[in-house]
Image (spheres, grey):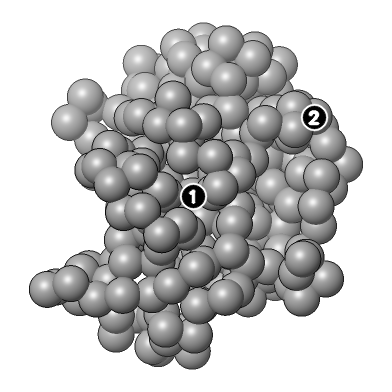
Amino acid sequence: MLTCGLVVMTAAPANAAGCAFEPQGEGRVAAVIDARTFRLDDGREVRLAGIVPAHPDKTKAALAAVVTGRDVALRGADDAPDRYGRQPAFVFLAGSEAPVQSELLRRGEALVSTEVASKDCATELAAAEAEARQARKGTWADPAAIKNAESPGDILAGIGRFTVVEGRVLSVRQAGATTYLNFGRNWTRDFAVTISRRMIPAFEAAGLVPKSLENRRIRVRGFVEARGGPRIEVLRVGQIEVLGAELAR
């Protein structure tokens, strides 16, 4: 598996802040419901924030092995439940300074999602994922875990799924309110990343003007859509990682 230096979502060691959000309660895990959800002994259901399961069944088993019967502390921006009544949170085992999410990422049983707004937390999670990727653990043992941008058919096979894609940006073009990072010359067939106009200030604030990505190799993550060819829409800057010069070919 290729290694890289990341410009946007860095894989450097996490700083002390990490995912240490405000405390949102404690409890003991009574049962694991699915790959990201468990029930506390008081009946509350908790949803792991910031990650996407790599393989639901395997991730569920890994989560159960880590948290079942354990005392946990919940942290998050707030404790508002989602539409299903689950409390999204970063989950810490008693005495641990790293969230359960990081443990699943280090095992290669999860991917960093697109929903992490905190830069410090995104850094911590990215470092854990990179550790597993470089060691080829879990999902990263499969060479097909990262899709090749030059193989749009393989990407299209994952419509509606959270997918990681790598490739060289052939061109950057704007059409109306959308900027396209094109990985091929045929827009009806080839893979592209879309960035809405409202996202451009965030890219510029991060020191990453989309046009500067032309002829650069990047790794992008998100849900695959079919709009002619396969597309991933970028909703946060952290969905894009600029790969190091050592990957150029």
Disc 1 target residue: 221
Residue 203, position in %: x, y? 39, 80
**Residue at left offset 75%, top offset 69%:** 248
Most extreme residue toward the left is: 176
- Looking at the rendered image, the quarter that the N terminus falls into is top right
Residue at the outermost right position: 135
Q: Which of 180 and 205 is in front in this view?
A: 180
Q: What residue type is labelled 1?
A: Arg
Q: Can residue 123 be seen at all in this image of the molecule?
A: yes
Q: Residue at x 57, y 11 (%)?
A: 57
Q: Is residue 155 left or right of residue 195?
A: right
Q: What residue type is labelled 2?
A: Ala
Q: Nearer the viewer, residue 222 or 68?
A: 222
Q: Residue at x 44, y 25 (%)?
A: 157
Question: Residue 65 lies in what quarter of the image?
Answer: top right
Q: Give the image quarter of residue 177.
A: bottom left
List x then y, in percent, for residue 121: 55, 61
Read off the residue under disc 2.
141
Answer with left or right where residue 181 lies relative to residue 50.
Answer: left
Give neighbour class at mark 2: few <14, some 14-19, many 20+ (Cα, 10 Å): some
Task: Identify the secondary structure beneath mark 1.
Answer: strand
